Amino acid sequence: MENEKLLFINPATGTKFGEVSMTTPEAVQIAVDEMRKSFPVWSGKSLRERIGILRKFQALLIDQRDEITNILNQDCGKSRQDGLIELFVTVDMLAQYCSQAPKWLRKKRVSSGLYLFKKCFVEHRPYGVVAVIAPWNYPLTLALPPMLAALLAGNTVVLKPSEVTGATGVLIERLIKQVPELTPFVRVVHGNSMVGAALTQAKPDYIFMTGSTPTGKKIMQAAAENLTPVALELGGKDAMIVLEDADLEAAARWGAWGAFFNTGQTCMAVERVYVVESKYDEFVKLALANTKEFKTGYTTDLNSPYSMGPVTDPRQVKTIERHLEDALAKGAHLLTEVKKDGMFFNPIVIENVNHSMLLMKEETFGPIMPIMKVKNEIEAVELANDSRYGLGASVWGRDIKHAKEVADKVEASSVIINDSIAQFGVPMLPFGGVKESGFGRTHGQEGLMQFTRPFSYAVGNPPFKWDIATILRENGHYKLATAIMGVVYGTSLRQKWQTLSQLFHKTSNVTNETTVNTEPIKISE
Ligand code: NAD
């Protein structure tokens, strides 16, 4: 029987531009098994060798930039330049990881404590086969960095790109095949949620998933069956807080950009704005002026006059419409028109919103900027935290120290002061979530180290007579061991002295500072 086909439909034009056969569950299992077989070869290579191979991949990404942005443009409807931003972030991360990995992955000697005659080390060993499950909103930059980090750490990888942007999955597979030294150590499986489910059930050694919170919960449940460790990078509802002393022009410009970039389909997009009441009217005026600058449309040209493409996933259109309808029914007030043409929306600014509305509580993932007036920054923080999500946040204020104090109170795993979204683009900053935005980190040292498990070892000659271990193991050393513990770890001179002096006193039935009670103690509540 022929495999079900995954069709590649350009969301901007509705035209089909390719297809791929979905991977069957049996073939998913074969891919995982093959990667398990090839794992010893890849992990057995020196880090230097692996870096050399990944640098070839880095060079290929730069060489093939125009093909990559061409496919991203058709697959997502985003402009070629927005596609290049994805590639840029990916290449930047890979370059920095390749230069930092030797330091981060180096075997480390740690203190042996009181085991004075041993040497103790920690090595960072790869898990084995890592499953990377990716979403559609940045199909390149949310698939390649975790895949490359896992490889760098010595794992083999099975990647499952999103079914919504299947062409990027095929593109990634082709790119991997162009680096023959890399090809045996990565497999790409194509298809929908069932293919993803088959991958989680195929017993990979680690699952790294980026996607929505409901899917993350399903994956965690499935992973529990085999106690497979998971990292989940999930949805968000990022708040932007505009303080009294904010540079309003900049806040309005980059706040609008943060809401509308990639048509709002960014996990850490500005999904809600809280502005202190004294600055509210001016901010709204400026935000509207900036919103007018966003032109919606599609072109395959390298330089696009449009700053917003279509919604990529047809399912997302329904969510955007549902959130808008709910907000308007509950009294929200539109400051722009809502124009929908196929998969295209114009950028939408809306006020008079509150937390009874889906628009302020659930992830919208569309080009809507809801703005809410707040009494002061205390109320802004309270509302920002009134969310089950906790991915990023932004705070705007000229007094940076004060803005950071406000940011510290926001329940998020990363914040940016006086900008939007940008913290994701910094390869050295770990990025992830708190609350229902997930856990695990991508980027930064943590983003690489999560693909390793610490392996510890201690070496030395067999225990000497005067080794602490020998003293503790041999009978008759209660008081000596107490004295050593007290002298080394006692938190006061009195405690050090008391434990030491017990060494020189006989055991007694009476307890005082220097004697030990040997009568059984009765214990009850
Ligand atoms: P999604 O949850 O629908 O799908 C994500 C991936 O999981 C896809 O490849 C899908 O096929 C797969 N999948 C679906 N069901 C599965 C199952 N039962 N078992 C295994 N795999 C399964 O998410 P999406 O719509 O592709 O992406 C948008 C979501 O991703 C948004 O919620 C967004 O906020 C989130 N996201 C988070 C981050 C982050 O870093 N935290 C980044 C980008 C996107």
Image (spheres, rainbow, N blue to C red):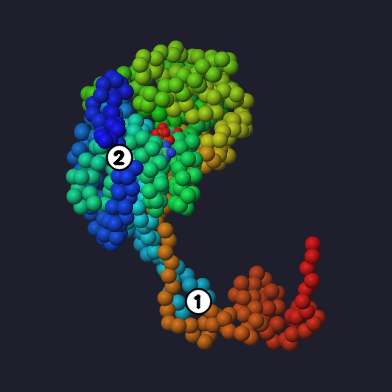
Tell whether label 2 touches label 1 (CB within 8 Å): no
Quadrant of the rendered image containing residue 385: top right
In the displayed structure, does residue 478 sit left or right of residue 328? Answer: right
Q: Amino acid type of disc 1?
A: Tyr
Separation (CA) of disc 1 from disc 2: 53 Å
In the displayed structure, does residue 465 sit left or right of residue 292? Answer: right
Q: Position of residue 118 (x, y in %)?
A: 45, 77
Residue in the image at 31% along x and 18% along y: 297
Asked whether 401 or 119 is in front, the reply is 119
Residue 23's disc number: 2
Helix, strand or loop at mark 1: loop
Residue in the image at 24% along x and 37% along y: 171
Helix, strand or loop at mark 2: loop
Q: Position of residue 214 (x, y in %)?
A: 49, 36
Q: Nearer the viewer, mark 1 or mark 2?
A: 2
Residue in the image at 62% along x and 30% along y: 379
Asked whether 398 or 208 is in front, the reply is 208
Quarter of the image with the C terminus in it: bottom right
Q: Position of residue 506 (x, y in %)?
A: 74, 87
Asked whether 187 or 75 is in front, the reply is 187
Residue count near mark 2 (Cα–Cα under 10 Å), binned few <14, some 14–19, many ≥20: many
In this view of the protein, can residue 421 be seen by the observer?
no
Residue corresponding to mark 1? 115
